[in-house]
Image: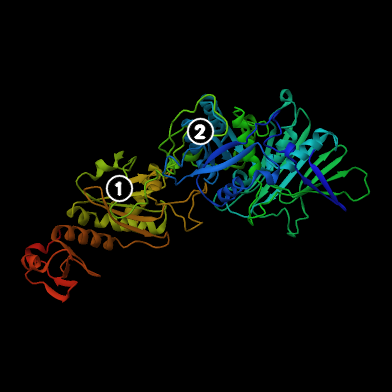
Amino acid sequence: MPRLHANNNTRHLIPSASDQVASAHLLTKPMAPFTLRWGIIATGLVAEAFAKDLQTSPASRGVSDVEHKIVAVSSSRDSKKAEAFLAKIKSTPHSHHFQNAMLAIQAHKHVLCEKALTVTAEQTRRLVQAAREKNVFLMEAVWTRFQPVSFKVRELIASGEIGVVEHVHRKVNLELAGGALLNFGTYALTWVFQVLYHLQPEAEKEGPEVISTRNKYFTGTDESTVVVCRFPKHKTIGIATTSLRSASDPSETGKATSIRIQGSKGEIAMAHPAYCPPGYRVLRNGAREESELIECTFPKDDGREGWGHGFFWEADEAASCIRDGKKESSTMPLHESIAIMEVMDEALRQGGVTYPSLITSHEFDAMSPLNTVFCLSSHTPPLHPKPHHTHTTITMADSRPAPLRLGSIAPNFQADTTNGPIDFHEFVGDNWVVFFSHPEDYTPVCTTELGAFAKLEPDFTKRGVKLIGLSANTLGSHEGWIKDIDEVTGSSVKFPIIADKERKVALAYDMIDHQDATNVDEKGTAFTIRSVFIIDPKKTIRTILSYPASTGRNSAEVLRIVDSLQTGDKHKITTPINWVPGDDVIVHPAVKNEQAKELFPEFRIVKPYLRFTPLPKEKATVA
C-alpha cells in the first residue's frame, strides 16, 4: 500500500518503491537498473516536460530498477547519438500519430505514442497489428493512468469501498481551440473506461452503447461534446464531457470536483484538474463527518525548479515492459485503446464531425506529408535483448526538406487539374512557370485575381511562361467556379488549376495559412494562402511571394518580376526599384568596368558600386 502521511484532516499519498507503476508487476528486480534510451519525435512544450521528467532522478519517486536516457530528438543527425530503444511520439499533432508511429514500427522501433493514439479506431487496429507483426512494444501514453492516484482509486473500487459502481461523470475545461473530443476527450473517457471497463474480468468486458451530442466550433470541429457510455451487461453509465467554454473549476481555487465515481455505498470525488487530480475524498452514504482529503503529490526534483510533471510514471512502465519482453502494458492494454477509439469514432459520427482523408487514412505511406519530420533506420533488433543497454538503432534525422528558399529545386508532384492529370516537372519542361495558390473557390478576392491572371496569360506566354493555380477544392468545384470567373471578369481561364483538397501539394510548398485562425474549411483544416512561386526552366525557384487572404495580388507585378529575372539572366544586369522594361538597369557587381565598356558602351558610374546603363537598343526588348 502507498504510505499515508496524516496531517489533521488531510493525508498525503506518497508511493513507496514497492508501489511504483514501473515495478508493481515485477516479481524480482535486477541488480542494476535497466536503462532505456529514448528518441523523442517532434519537440514542443509537452515534449519538453516529458524530457525533463525522464531526467528526474528515479529515486525521487522510489524507483530503483529502471532509468532513462535521452539520446535523440527529431533533429538529430548523428546516428551514433541516435541509438535508441524506443521512439517517443510526444508533440506531433494527433493527425500525424498514425503515420509517425507506423513509420517507427516498420523500422522495428518500440513506440510510446501520446494520446489520442490515432484519429480513428481502424488506424489503432492497424498499429496494433503492425506492432505484433514486428514484435515491438506499443503503448498509448495516457499519463493519467499511471499516476498513483489512479492506482489508488482503482484499488478502492476493486475492494468495494464504495460498493458497486453505478455511475462515473467526468468534466474538463479546454483552454485551447481545436476539436474538444479528439484533443482532450481522451481524458474524459479515461476515467469512464478505467473504472467501468478496465476493472471488469476479461470475459465480461464489453464495449458500451454510445449516445453523443455536440456544439460545433467555428472551424467545424466540436466545441463541446457530451458522450454517454452505457455498459448494458453491468448496468452502469459513464458520462464524459469536454468543452471549450465551460470550466471544471470556475473559481480557480482547486477545490472544485471534476470527477465523481458513484457507487451503492458512496462515491469518490476527485479534485480539478481531472487529467492529474491532486487528491480525492471518499464520501460514504449517510456519513455526517467531513471526509478527509487524500492528497496525491508529485515528487519534485529538489535541485531543479519546475521539474517533475508526472510523465515519468508512464516512462517507467514502458521501460519495465520492454525490459521484461512485454509488447504491451496491462495498465493501458491495446484492446482498451481500440475500444476507446471506437467510442470516439461513434461520438464524432453522431456529431457530424469529419476530418480530411489525409489524416483519417489507415493506409501507411512512408512518403506521406505527415512523415516529413524524420526518418528511421530499419535495423532489426535482436529477439533477446541484453539488459542495461540498447540493442537497436534509430536514426531520427531531419529528412524534411529544408524550407523552400530562393534557389531551391521546386518539389515535384503528381496532381489532378482542370486540364487533366500532370507531373509537375514534366509540366514545367523547358519553360518558366508562375505557380500560385489561392484560399478557396467562390470567394471574392480570388475571383478577381484569377480573372486578372487569365487576361495577362497571353503576355506570360510571349515570355515563355506557363501559369498554373491551386486551391484546396475539388475539380468539380473548380470547373463551376471558372464559369463565374469568366462571367464576372470578362476573362477566359485556360490555364490549369490544381485540385488539392487534401493539401498534399500545399504542404510540400508550405502554402498553409498559420496566421488567420478563421481561414479554415468546415472540417477545421487550414486553407492555402496567396503564394506565388516563379520557377525557371531548370526547376529552380527564383521568386517566392506570400500574401494574406485579405489582400489581392498585383498580377502586373508578377509579370514585371518575370521580366526582371529573364533580362538579368540574359544581360548580366540587375534592376533598380520600380524598374519596368525600357528603363535603365544596373550593371551587375561581378562585371568589371573593362567588360562593362564592351557590353554597355553608355554605362555611367554613380558610385564605384553603383553603375547605371541603358540596354543597347537591340537588347531592350523583353528577353
Residue at the image position 12 percent from the left and 62 percent from the top: 621
Residue hosting label 2? 109
**Helix, strand or loop under label 1:** loop
Where residue 8 sits: x, y (%)? 88, 53
Circles 1 and 2: CB atoms closer than 8 Å = no
**Residue 289 shown left or right of residue 453 in the figure:** right
Foreground disc of the pair 1, 2: 2
Q: Nearer the viewer, residue 213 or 171?
A: 171
> Residue 169: image x %, image y %?
75, 43
Quadrant containing the C terminus is: bottom left
In 3D space, how far apart are the residues under numbered discs 1 and 2 (Cα atoms)?
A: 33 Å
How many dots with numbers? 2
**Residue situated furthest top in the rendering:** 203
Q: What is the quadrant of residue 189 in the picture? A: top right
Which one is nearer the viewer's eye here, 500 or 413?
413
The answer to whether residue 157 shows anywhere in this view is yes
- Report which residue position mark 1 lands on: 410
